[in-house]
Amino acid sequence: MNWKSFAPAFVGASLIAAGAAAATLTTAVPTLSGSYAYSHSSFCQPTILVNYTNGSPSLINLNGGGNYGGWGDIRFEGGTVTFNPSKSTLTYSSTDIEGSPMLLQSSGGGPDNLEGTQLAQAPNSGKSTFSNTSTTVTLSGQSYNAAYGAVTGSGIAEYVSLIGIDSKGCANQWTMSRV
């Protein structure tokens, strides 16, 4: 057999080997499984109603019916979340701090002369559904962009960061580290 008759077999074998190598380089979807410590921040823009008198603006109030959350809302949350990939469910337990991102103090307003919701801290827990791809995580039907950190040999993500805008127009960010 001369080299010319061997060349097609060699090229064919090379292409098969290259295809197998490319298949092993394809990134698998990391699995979210077990417990993670997490922090979550959410910001909903307030809507401010401004009245103009003789061309000069004068603040009327924070609009309670705005498109982006009315009074707005800011939320900080820290806790633990446990993912169960076989059931596509998660459970969480956290402490939340939530309220209006700004307060309006008025000289003739309500009983405390403040409009908006002052920041308050409270425990929070619950369960939800989730799914994920190599670039997104969907929580309760809402998708967020995902960036994964280290992945164990069994494919479990050790770290994930999520960011996105929810259906109400609020910005959300999560960071999760496996514990």
Image (cartoon, helix red, strand yellow):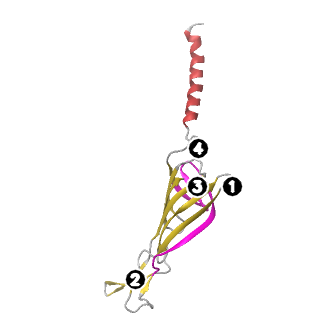
Q: Earlier in the sequence, mark 3 or mark 2?
A: 3
Sequence-wise, the earlier of marks 1 and 4 is 1
- Spatial CA span between label 3 and label 1: 15 Å
Q: Which residue is mark 4?
A: 155
Residue type at mark 1 is: Lys
The reply to whether dot 1 and dot 4 touch (C-beta < 8 Å) is: no
- Vertical side of 27 occupied by 138: above or below: below
Residue bearing the label numbered 2: 104
At x 55%, y 71%, the residue is 123
Q: Position of residue 167 (x, y in %)?
A: 55, 66
Q: Are marks 1 and 2 in contact (CB under 8 Å)?
A: no
Q: Mark 1 falls on what kind of element?
A: loop
Q: Relative to residue 7, is residue 119 drawn left or right?
A: left
Q: Name which residue type carries label 3.
A: Ser
The mark that comes first in sequence, 3 or 4, is: 3
Query: Would residue 68 be visible to someone looking at this image?
Result: no
Mark toward the start of the polypeptide (1 vs 2): 1
Overall secondary structure of the magenta stretch? strand
Mark 4 residue type: Gly
Q: Which residues are magenta?
A: 116-145
Question: According to the image, label 1 marks what residue?
Answer: 87
Mark 2, residues whose alpha carbon is within 10 Å: few (<14), some, or many (≥20)? some
